[in-house]
Image (spheres, rainbow, N blue to C red):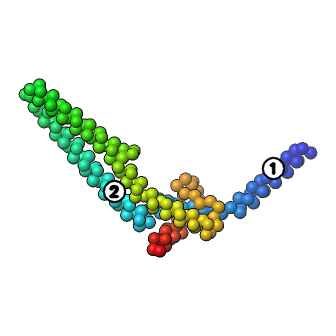
Amino acid sequence: MKKTNVLLVIILVVCFAGSALAELKIGYVNSDRILSEYQPALDAQKELDTEAKKLEQEYEAMIMKLDSLNQAYERQKLIMSDSRRQEKENEIIQMQKQIQQFQVQKMGPQGEIYQKENELLSPIIQKINQAIQELGKEQKYDFIMNAGALLFAVPAHDLTEDVIYKLNRMSSE
């Protein structure tokens, strides 16, 4: 008798869970696609790429200067006085320090390029999240997930087009 009751409880739990899941409305968006098709995101990325290229050119110029200093030092170190040799070695060390500081200040985890990225993309991401929130409320979704983590999803539940449409509509208002 006890085995039958346990089996009945399991069947009821499975049925209840199945019907509860059937009532859930779940959708997903492809955030990479949204960022690649939403014009303000493209504009921000273009500006960020320009800034990164400028920093890269500045960095390469510093590397070339260091290389030039090293080559000149190596060619002339045997004919230099001790004081001149020490002066050139200090110049090389200073240049190496400048390059390291540049890397940290401009391209490091807290550097200018990441601050610029945050400055440019934060308002865009907030707007995307706002559009997703509004779409979820309007269409009564229980969950909207990012497709980047999904292993399988039915294309009918893809809300990416709707989000892009809503973002474009929000931008024109």
Q: Residue furthest right?
A: 1
Q: Residue furthest top?
A: 82
Please name the residue that numbered disc 2 is placed on.
49
Residue type beneath disc 2: Asp
**SS at badge 1:** helix
Task: Say few, some or many: other residues with alpha carbon within 10 Å of mark 2 (under 14 / 14 to 19 / 20 or more).
Answer: some
Question: Residue sitting at 33 percent across and 56 percent down?
Answer: 49
**SS at badge 2:** helix
Calculate the distance from the C-alpha at mark 2 to the C-alpha at mark 1. Answer: 57 Å
Please name the residue that numbered disc 1 is placed on.
10
Name which of mark 2 and mark 1 comes first in the sequence.
1
Question: Residue sitting at 7 percent across and 28 percent down?
Answer: 79
Q: Position of residue 8 (x, y in %)?
A: 85, 51
Residue type beneath disc 1: Ile
Q: Position of residue 145 (x, y in %)?
A: 58, 58
Q: Position of residue 148 (x, y in %)?
A: 52, 55
Which mark, residue 147? none
Question: Residue sitting at 88 percent across and 47 percent down?
Answer: 4
Question: Residue sitting at 85 percent across and 46 percent down?
Answer: 6
Left/right placement of residue 135 relative to residue 47 reads right
